[in-house]
Image (cartoon, helix red, strand yellow):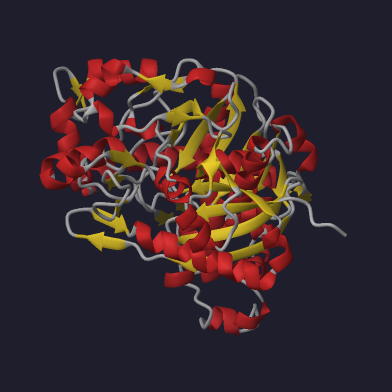
Amino acid sequence: MAIPPQILAIDLGTSGMKAALVAADGTVTGWAERPVPLVVLPGGGAEQDPVAWWDALAEAVADLGRTFPDHLRAVTTICSSTQGEGTIAVDAHGDPLTRCISWLDMRGAPHLRRQFGGFPAYDGISVRKIARWLRLTGGMPSVTGKDPAAHMLFVRDELPDVYRKTRTFLNVLDWINLKLTGRTVATVDSILTSWVTDNRKAPSIRYSAALVAASGIDADKFPPIVACTEVIGTLAPHAADHLGLPRSVQVVAGAIDNTAAAIGAGTIRDNETHLYLGTSSWIAAHVPKKKTDVLTGIASIPCAIPDRYLMTALQATAGANLTWLRDKIVEYDDPIVSAGHVSRDEGTIFDAFDKIIPMVPAGANGVIYTPWLYGERAPVDDPNLRAAFLNISLDTTRSDLLRAVFEGVALNTRWLAKAVDKFLGTPVSSMVITGGAARSDSWCQIFSDVLGVEIRRDANPVTVNARGAGWIGAVGAGLISFDDIPALTRNDHVFTPGPDHARYLEIYDIYQDLHKRLAPVYRRLNRQAD
């Protein structure tokens, strides 16, 4: 049987480089990955080496070639999904002048306040400038300094020699595309967090001269903007040689990770939501209009579908709570695991959790967990919030604590979902769940019970970003249209609310009350986070 045309989908996250072979129907044939280290620096710095990304990509593609040689030979298109909010200063030859300043990097925060201060101010930023950003872009720079608007100012002020040599500032996606094609561009979503674009007309996202002038960055250091589905060229000779692919392979611009996940989840139609469960989590849906809810921090932003926006409501930590559990409470060699629940060889940590969680009744025997390990983004933007276990007694077991963590993330998502319902103007009754943490059956059921909605699980949640990049590439290559995608989507299980829903309604009321009472306490404890 002839192998259909394949899209080489690049999925570059903070933890490493992944590459997959994706057909236009969404079939993911191959998957390979390589870790890439994160360099944490004093003073809030966090960087990654772009050259390490490029080398890791070649290694991952070579792995695919060894395992799936016929499918790799069928590659006609490359399309990427990457982490967002990273910043790379490149010279006139396209070479990086420093390591990539990561989305975790906060060193630009004081420079942001100096550039955009004024009276009256909110969090050190001029209220008038905030109003202009909201009107034109739909959002504003993060006062934490964790996006390119602050990163570029950090380079300008702290690394003047680098700034002088900088031809263009690129986001992560843009640099990968430069390496692939030799062409310097930004996509409508990768440029967003430079906060210099007029996003009021979805089909024609463009630079705002006023925002560029106010940014403090030379206008010629911003790249041209293209649609996510634009074919930006074919493989440059050095890229073809590096990856072992023909120079005829075309490159579609692609998208940052939350944009790609919305496509990979198959939630293409207006107001159709998906819940992504990764280190952080979000509820997202495509919508027809640009809109911002400043009270809850929810906005609709440019996305891969040319005439639509993507509403994104971000929860700061979701799967990160499980990572904390795995590393601090229940490791694979922990007695609670080895005493009969699951062994290391029997499966993932999700299998271990799925054997433990059903042993504890809904409500975790009275224990409530607040999942704010790293503050919160929406429906409240509060960096001072922290995680806590409430109502622990002498009878509390570690299994109770485990279930409480699963429930706490779901309760926080219910809080977020209520704000999403208001934003969309209609209650959500069903949503797709995807992302690596969606592999837990127990957690999917808890989400359904807590939210009171149908949860449809992506049949392959780990590959959602790669599949999204594959589909964006397939649309750009003319193999399918976005309207074809819902029929290509596959779910492996539907979770519906059970009798525990009523119990969770009571707990949710308590959860909301806990936030009101604890927020002032956390503000006093963590003033240094302001």
Q: Image check: 492 left or right of 274?
A: right
Name which residue lies at 58% across and 25% down.
306
Q: Image check: 299 left or right of 42?
A: right
**Relative vertical location of residue 528 with respect to residue 61 in this rendering, above or below:** above
Q: Position of residue 112 (x, y in %)?
A: 19, 34
In-front residue for pair 258/222 = 222
**Relative vertical location of residue 488 with respect to residue 69 in this rendering, above or below:** above
Name which residue lies at 21% across and 29% down.
218
Quadrant of the rendering where the C terminus is positioned: top left
Q: Position of residue 490 (x, y in %)?
A: 77, 47
Q: Position of residue 2 (x, y in %)?
A: 84, 57
The answer to whether residue 240 of the structure is visible from this angle is yes
In-front residue for pair 56/411 = 56
Figure label count: 0
Q: Image check: 427 left or right of 516?
A: right
The answer to whether residue 404 of the structure is visible from this angle is no
Taking the view exactly as shown, the residue that stands out farthest to the right is: 1
Name which residue lies at 67% across and 70% down.
355
Name which residue lies at 12% across and 40% down.
157
**Relative vertical location of residue 167 with respect to residue 246 in this rendering, above or below:** above
Quadrant of the rendering where the N terminus is positioned: bottom right
Q: Image check: 100 left or right of 394?
A: left
